[in-house]
Image (cartoon, grey):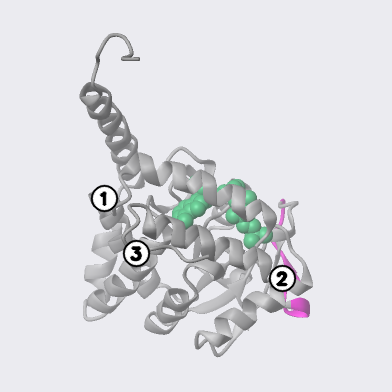
Amino acid sequence: MVIPPTHPRYRSLLEREKVVEGVRDGYVALQGLIAHGRGECFDYLIGEATQPFAERAIEAAAAALLTARRPVISVNGNVAALVPGDVVALAKAVPALLEVNLFYRTREREEKIAEVLRRHGAEEVLGVGEDAACTIPELFSERRRVSCRGIYVADVVLVPLEDGDRTEALRRLGKTVIAIDLNPLSRTARAASITIVDNVTRAMPKLVEAVTRLKSWDRERLLGLLRSYDNGAVLADAVSHIAKRLTEITASLPRRGGVVV
Ligand code: PTJ
C-alpha cells in the first residue's frame, strides 16, 4: 500500500503497515494487531510525541543498561516489525544480548524474528529453539521459556511491549525490568522498575542516543541517576498529562446548538 507522505497520519499509517506486513510474513502474532491498536489509542492520548516523563525514564533506562553486568533485550513480533534496526543498534551500543521471547511462541516465529534481527546486523540471537531451555518459575505463558545464557541470568532486562505476568515474575527474581509501554495504567507499566511511556518507535532510537551520551559517565554518576529516579512519579506524570490534555481538548470543543440542514 502506498501512503502519501503528506497524509496527516503518515507516520502512524506507516507503522500500522509494518505490523500488518509482519503478520503477512508470519512473525507478528495476529494478536499483535490488537496490541498495536491499543498502543495507537494511548499514543493519541499522550499527543504522539515523547513527553518529559518518558525522557526521564529513557535516561534512567540508559543508566540501568550501562551499569548492568548482564543486560538483555527481549524481542517479540511487534518489536521486530517496528524497530529491528534500533534494537540491534541498542544491543551493540550497550553492549547487551538479544533474545527472542514470545507470548505466542512457535518455532517458526522464533526463527523468523531471529532472521529479521540478523538482516539488521545482529550477530547472535538467543532464545531460539533448544536455546530457550530454562524456565522462569511461576509463569504459565510460553514466555516462561528463556535462554539459560540470556534472560535467565540477566540482571537488567529490557522488555518492550510486555505482559504484566512476566514483568512481575522477572521482578520477583530480583531483576531490574525496563518496560516500554504506551499505557501508563497497565500492569506491566506499574510492575516495571523503569517504565518508558512512549511509542517504541520513538523511544528506541532515543534510548540508543541516551546510551551513547551516558557512556562517558562514570559508574558512580550513573548509579546516582538511578538512585534518584522515581518510577511512581513518572507514571503519575504520564496519567496527569493525559488527564490535562483531555480537559484542554474538552474545553476547546466548539459548542453550537442545532444542526444546519
Ligand atoms: O510476539 P508475541 O507473541 O510475544 O506477542 C506480542 C503481543 C504484543 C501481542 C503480546 O505481548 C500482547 O498480547 O501484549 P499486550 O498484553 O496486548 O500488551 C501490549 C502493550 O503494549 C499494551 O499495553 C499496548 O498499549 C502497548 N503497545 C502497543 N503498541 C505499542 C505499545 N507500547 C509502545 N509502543 C507501541 N508501538
Magenta residues, start to end: 129-138
Sequence-first tag of 3 and 1: 3
* Mark 2 residue type: Arg
Q: Where is residue 179 in the image (x, y as percent from the top left)?
A: 46, 56
Rendered image quadrant of residue 114: bottom right
Quarter-of-image position of residue 98 = bottom right
Number of the label disc, if any, that sits on residue 5: 3
Q: Disc 1 to disc 2, how far (Cα)?
A: 33 Å
Does mark 2's beta carbon lie closer than 8 Å to ligand 1? yes
- Secondary element under disc 2, as helix, strand or loop, is helix
207 in relation to 233, above or below: below
Residue sitting nearer the eye, 86 or 11: 11
Q: Distance between the residues labelled 3 and 2?
A: 31 Å
Q: Quadrant of the C terminus?
A: top left
**Up-down: is 245 above or below 199?**
above
Q: What element carries label 3?
A: loop
Q: Could you tell me which residue is drawn at 78 percent across and 73 percent down?
A: 107
Q: Nearer the viewer, residue 6 or 46?
A: 6
* Residue occupying the point 37% across, 82% down: 93
* Badge 1 amino acid: Gln
Q: In which quarter of the image is residue 257?
A: top left
Task: Tell whether label 2 touches label 3 (CB within 8 Å).
Answer: no
Name the residue furthest front.
261
The reply to whether the magenta stretch includes residue 135 is yes
Residue 51: mark: 1
Whole-Å distance between the Cαs marked 3 and 1?
Answer: 24 Å
